[in-house]
């Protein structure tokens, strides 16, 4: 793998930060100019069309998510490593499967996408 980060170690720190509800620890992995998309962002902030731009806006979005989901908890199921990319496959507090698709610029995430399992 040709990443600046170790995918397994990154996913461990990512889950630990989320599960401790430490928003600043989660955000520390992201570039100031990050672009992040998620269907949940579209639900929480419809005016974004599901695309969050910049770390400050991401802080607002995820802060709202932590307020709305007091039992939030992630369990990493698998980690996929690519060239400058990490995919974290995880289960949320309701047992639902999801993925974070993260594109790195050095050791920080420049672009991310929250994706959710759909019924076939």
Image (cartoon, rainbow, N blue to C red):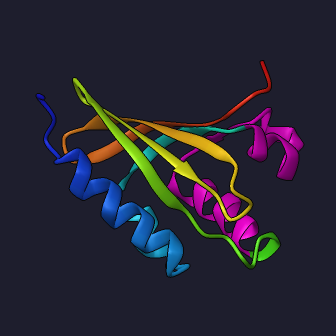
Q: Position of residue 11 (x, y in %)?
A: 34, 55
Closer-to-camera residue (54/81): 81
Closer-to-camera residue (21/56): 21
The quadrant the C terminus occupies is: top right
Q: Position of residue 49 (x, y in %)?
A: 80, 32
Q: Taking 91 as reference, is 60 above or below it? A: below
* Magenta residues, dominant SS class: helix
Name the residue rendered at 30%, 37% in the picture.
104
Residue 3 vs residue 60: left or right?
left
Q: Position of residue 90 (x, y in %)?
A: 52, 49
Name the residue rendered at 41%, 72% in the picture.
16
Residue 26 vs residue 68: left or right?
left
Q: Residue furthest top?
A: 120
Residue 97 vs residue 10: left or right?
right
Q: Position of residue 37 (x, y in %)?
A: 63, 36
Residue 42 vs residue 75: left or right?
right
Magenta-tinted stretch: 39-66
Quadrant of residue 105 within the rendered picture: top left
Name the residue rendered at 44%, 63% in the picture.
27
Closer-to-camera residue (30/73): 73
Residue 48 on the magenta span: yes
Disc count in the image?
A: 0
The quadrant the N terminus occupies is: top left
Name the residue rendered at 69%, 33% in the picture.
117
Quadrant of residue 3 within the rendered picture: top left
Residue 72 on the magenta span: no
């Amino acid at each position: 793998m040709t990443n600046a980060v170790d995918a397994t170690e990154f996913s461990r720190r990512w889950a630990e930060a989320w599960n401790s509800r430490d928003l600043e620890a989660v955000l520390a992995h992201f570039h100031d100019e990050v672009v992040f998309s998620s269907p949940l962002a579209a639900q929480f902030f419809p005016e974004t069309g599901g695309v969050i731009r910049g770390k400050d806006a991401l802080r607002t979005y995820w802060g709202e998510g932590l307020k709305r989901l007091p039992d939030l908890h992630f369990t990493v199921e698998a980690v996929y490593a690519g060239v400058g990319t990490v995919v974290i496959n995880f289960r949320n507090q309701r047992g639902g499967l999801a993925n974070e698709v993260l594109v790195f610029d050095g050791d920080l995430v420049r672009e991310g996408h929250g994706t959710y399992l759909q019924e076939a």
